Amino acid sequence: MPEWPEMENYRKMLAERISGQPITKVEVTREKSINVPVEVFTQELVGATVLFVERRGKMLLFHLDNGKRLLLHLMLGGLIHFGPPAERPDRSVQVALEFPNGELCFIGLRLGYIHLYKVKEVEAHLAKLGPDPLDKRLTLEQFKKRFAGKRGSLKTALVNQQVVSGIGNCYADEIVFDAAVRPDAHISDLEPATWENLYHSMHKVLLNAASLGGYMEMPLTADDTLTGGYNDHCLVYDRGGEPCVRCDGTIEQGEINSRKMFYCPSCQKDR
């Protein structure tokens, strides 16, 4: 599932291509991927111009000049592609928006969606979303307060979108590895120094992953050589059985609350 780095990568690339561009055509092949009748969806979008693209956690928010918003959540299996109609991938496209300079396809939206909202509606929908990991208002003290009173494991809290938004399975494991703490460490046991390490590791890992295009390998355009570049730089995620890059240990794969976790038992502490 796309996380903070993947969606930030998509946001930047889409902003360069569709900001200031009008939507000239709408195609919907799966009505369940949208939240209003196809006729309403089409009527509201055709002729509307995308003012800018914003990211909220794992989601993208397209601001339109008619006052409406398009909220995209790719969920598991969702992808996007931009380019001439002739370059449309040979994949199932649920929704497509055509612009003068290309077509934006939303692919694999079986669990994901692209919903049309008024401003108040979208803000209500996102009201419970936690702060962005890189929000300047999320200081170290505020970061620690987000976890106050939480029980259970560190990873379970890190992927909770109401605690901090945008972090999922992959980057939770990468962040805690960088901070040298186990993903299954109990929140109540963590030492003050560990919280500080986690806070700085969160910034470091997410920014680095975004600069390398995230770990998902579906390119946004035919000439996109950036997207998916972080996949070869993951230090623990999906690296079960491989040697640890930091010590002589071996990366292990486990499970916590039905989620996979990857960690080094030799150099990641439990507090």
Image: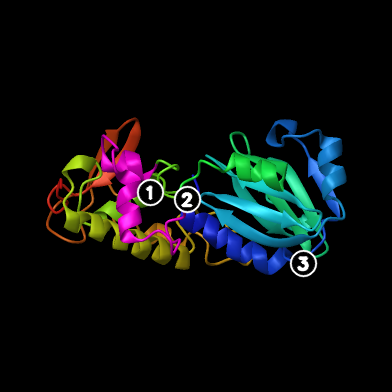
What whole-number distance in Å separates the C-alpha atoms at marks 1 and 3? Answer: 34 Å
Report which quarter residue 38 is drawn in.
Answer: top right
Residue 251 locus on image (x, y percent): 21, 48
Q: Nearer the viewer, residue 210 or 142?
A: 142
Mark 2 or 3, which is nearer the eye?
3
Residue 20 in view here: yes
Mark 2 or 3, nearer chain start: 2
- Judge the density around disc 2: few (<14), some (14-19), many (≥20) Cα neighbours within 10 Å: many
Question: Which structural element holds mark 3?
Answer: loop
Give the vertical position of 116 relative to 52 (above or below).
above
Dot 3 amino acid type: Gly
Q: Which residue is mark 3?
A: 20
Question: Which structural element holds mark 1?
Answer: helix
Mark 1 or 3, nearer chain start: 3
Q: Nearer the viewer, residue 87 or 138?
A: 138
Q: Nearer the viewer, residue 104 or 124?
A: 124
Q: Do residues under tags 2 and 3 come within 8 Å of each other at their CB atoms?
A: no
Mark 1 or 2, nearer chain start: 2
Q: Do residues under tags 1 and 2 come within 8 Å of each other at their CB atoms?
A: yes
What whole-number distance in Å separates the C-alpha atoms at marks 2 and 3? Answer: 26 Å
Residue 42 locus on image (x, y percent): 84, 43
Q: Which residue is mark 1?
A: 170
- Judge the density around disc 3: few (<14), some (14-19), many (≥20) Cα neighbours within 10 Å: some
Residue 174 in view here: no
Magenta stretch bounds: 131-159
Point 27% across, 35% down: residue? 151
Dot 1 amino acid type: Cys
Question: Which structural element holds mark 2?
Answer: loop
Report which quarter residue 138 is drawn in.
Answer: bottom left
Q: Which residue is mark 2?
A: 3
Residue 179: mark in rendering: none
Give the vertical position of 149 relative to 166 (above or below).
above
